[in-house]
Image: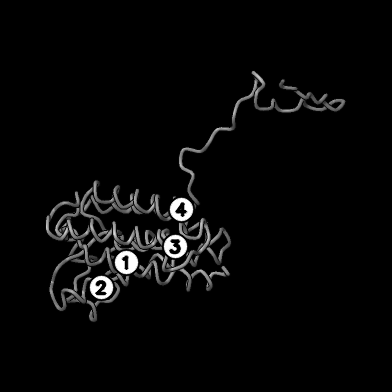
Amino acid sequence: MDVAYFEAPAPGGQPPHPAPGDPAYRPAKEPIVNAPWPVAVLCVGLVALYFIQSRFPIDEVSDALAFSPSVIWSEPRRMITYGFVHGSWAHVLMNAGFILAFGAPVARWFGPSLRGVVGFYVFYLVCGILAAFGFALVHPGQAVPVVGASGAASGLMGAAARMIAGQGSLGPLFSRPVGSMAAAWLAVNVIMAFAGGLLPGAGPAGAAWEAHLAGFMAGVLLVGVFGRLAGRR
């Protein structure tokens, strides 16, 4: 038998909220996007930057901001700028969705403090830089343009694997979730390597699978280091 308990309102106060099971009960509305604000700002920022970029010819933007191994020492700033340039709307929206999915658990672990937010953004940028460096190691000296945030986003994917292994905290490096996600991401990128153009909207850069794998490795290996620098233990 179910027993319902009722609480009388305090004099002059509001009646208590209906409890589950009460016909008047209405569950609280969930937000459409349940992601930490640093991740939401990053995704919206990438889309906004592409809106501005789309006002200019892609060749001009690529010549000014894209990364290529041939300029790794002469213009190292491009190891950062390339991650904020995309080849099409499909490209930027796909990367924004990727960041939204895998960046959320990582940003929650870093925390909402100033130190945590800065640490999250610096970690993201470092993953993008190392992704570009990994691409350059495979294509030394070549003038192959690379654009897009997928290298840094792959770093968030690697870090998210550690979060899954630790059920929201930093899990062990050698764990089933990390191994499974690494194997799956490797398989996807092998397909990309042998089926050029599989990644929609990548523009002149194509699918830089080398950067994806380097970024993933950077995320897996460095999230703990940057977490400690951001105050996580």
Q: Residue drawn 47% across and 67% down?
A: 172
Mark 1 sits on what residue? 215
Q: Residue drawn 85% across and 28% down?
A: 10
**What residue occupies the far top of the structure in this picture?**
23
Is 59 placed above or below 123 here?
A: above
Whichever of callouts 2 and 4 sits on the residue coming sooner in the sequence is 4
Residue 215, image x, y percentages: 32, 66
CB within 8 Å, label 1 to label 2:
yes
Secondary-structure class at tag 4: helix
**What residue occupies the far front of the structure in this picture?**
1
Residue 224 is tagged as: none
Mark 2 sits on what residue? 134
Asked if residue 48 shows in the view, the reply is: no
Labels 3, 4: front one: 3
For marks 1 and 2, give the CA distance: 8 Å
CB within 8 Å, label 3 to label 2:
no
Mark 3 sits on what residue? 162
Mark 4 sits on what residue? 104
Whichever of callouts 3 and 4 sits on the residue coming sooner in the sequence is 4
| Label 3 crowd bin: few (<14), some (14–19), many (20+), radius 10 Å | many
For marks 3 and 2, give the CA distance: 21 Å
Q: Quadrant of the C terminus?
A: bottom right
Residue 123, image x, y percentages: 43, 68
